[in-house]
């Protein structure tokens, strides 16, 4: 399915989830294009996001918005593999990026997406708002109030930059982010990172985890039904992994440093132990591998 945004753009995890919901909504309604109305619906469906909070405060409900969206376009009998973005959606996304920059935010969150919708003020969103007896001005005021009073959504992209990741580490973090978005998990957690490290055969981490008797079946089960421990944000792991890399004399944070840190922080120790891995032995094995390089 065609992504709404380039992967290089700096979106929060919640914004990425909202964009995934946006595309899924247009497909579920069998509409010919993804537009700003679907984006509004996508933000509303993003549990735990600042944008959803703002829309709930305006009295919106998913059932009502879904019904209103269903009236916007005729349904297609056969959908293409990639539903195109409408020009009004692209305009809303561009304005959202401008809003984030204007407010001095390094990452674009769901509240910025709402501001972008109101700046563009074209396509399905204003039609949808009128159907709900609301206006773009009301939405903009509510989104700005949320931006001013609510803590910014977690920005994994900033942690990625600060950790000075190697290219392979970036791929691993990207895989962890992607699976978290696909499963609509509230965070990109230490469990997603462990899963990605166990999958990456180009790195020594997959072999090290197999040798440590990681319960991969149990790990996949946690992807389907994540625990609180699994969902603990991995920003702290990424920051501490840079220290591990520095102590090892590396200018970049490699996948082995990520695994070493994961097996050293309390939440990581608890998670790998739950999956049959002795964290102390794993740390020794990773250090031995790094020393042999």
Image (cartoon, rainbow, N blue to C red):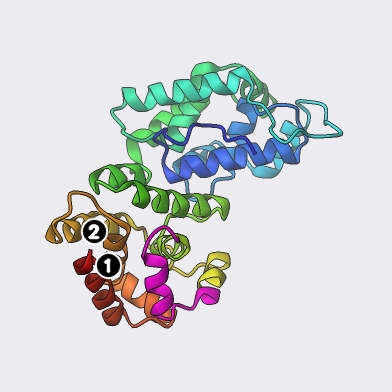
Q: In this view, does 205 lie above or below 281?
A: above
| Residue on which disc 2 sits | 241
| Above/below status of 247 relative to 173 | below
Which residue is drawn at the image coordinates 66% and 43% (left, top)? 62
Query: Residue 83's image quarter?
Result: top right
Indicate the position of residue 143 as horizontal and vertical percent values: 45, 31
Q: Residue at x 33, y 70 (%)?
A: 268
Q: Earlier in the sequence, mark 2 or mark 1?
A: 2
The residue where tag 1 is placed is: 260
Give the extent of the magenta segment.
Answer: 201-218
The image position of residue 130, as x and y in percent, is 66, 23
Q: Seen in the image, is 190 located left or right of residue 19? A: left
Q: Residue placed at 51% from the left, 67% from the top?
A: 226
- Residue toward you, 160 or 38: 160
User: How far from the left and from the top, in percent, is residue 140?
Assistant: 47, 25
Q: In this view, does 35 lie above or below 174?
A: above
In the image, 209 versus 26, the foreground residue is 209
């Amino acid at each position: 399915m065609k992504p709404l945004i380039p992967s290089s753009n700096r979106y929060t995890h919640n914004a990425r989830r909202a964009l995934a919901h946006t595309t899924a909504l247009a497909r579920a309604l069998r509409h010919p294009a993804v537009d700003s109305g679907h984006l509004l619906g996508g933000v509303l469906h993003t549990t735990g996001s600042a944008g959803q909070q703002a829309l709930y405060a305006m009295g919106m409900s998913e059932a009502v918005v879904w019904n209103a969206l269903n009236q916007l376009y005729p349904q297609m009998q056969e959908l293409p593999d990639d539903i195109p973005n409408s020009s009004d959606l692209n305009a809303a996304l561009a304005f959202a990026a401008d809003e984030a920059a204007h407010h001095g935010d390094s990452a674009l969150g769901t509240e910025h997406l709402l501001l972008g919708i109101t700046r563009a003020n074209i396509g399905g969103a204003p039609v949808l708002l009128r159907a709900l007896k609301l206006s773009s001005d009301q939405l903009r005021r509510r989104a700005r109030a949320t931006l001013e009073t609510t803590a910014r959504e977690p920005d994994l992209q900033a942690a990625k930059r600060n950790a000075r990741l190697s290219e392979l580490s970036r791929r691993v973090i990207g895989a962890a982010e992607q699976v978290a978005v696909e499963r609509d998990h509230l965070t990109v957690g230490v469990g997603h990172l462990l899963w990605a490290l166990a999958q990456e055969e180009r790195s020594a981490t997959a072999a090290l985890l197999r040798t440590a008797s990681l319960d991969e079946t149990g790990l996949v089960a946690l992807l389907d039904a994540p625990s609180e421990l699994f969902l603990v944000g991995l920003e702290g792991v990424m920051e501490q992994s840079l220290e591990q890399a520095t102590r090892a004399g590396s200018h970049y944070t490699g996948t082995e440093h990520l695994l070493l840190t994961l097996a050293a922080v309390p939440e990581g120790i608890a998670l790998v132990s739950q999956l049959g891995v002795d964290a102390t032995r794993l740390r020794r094995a990773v250090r031995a591998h790094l020393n042999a390089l």
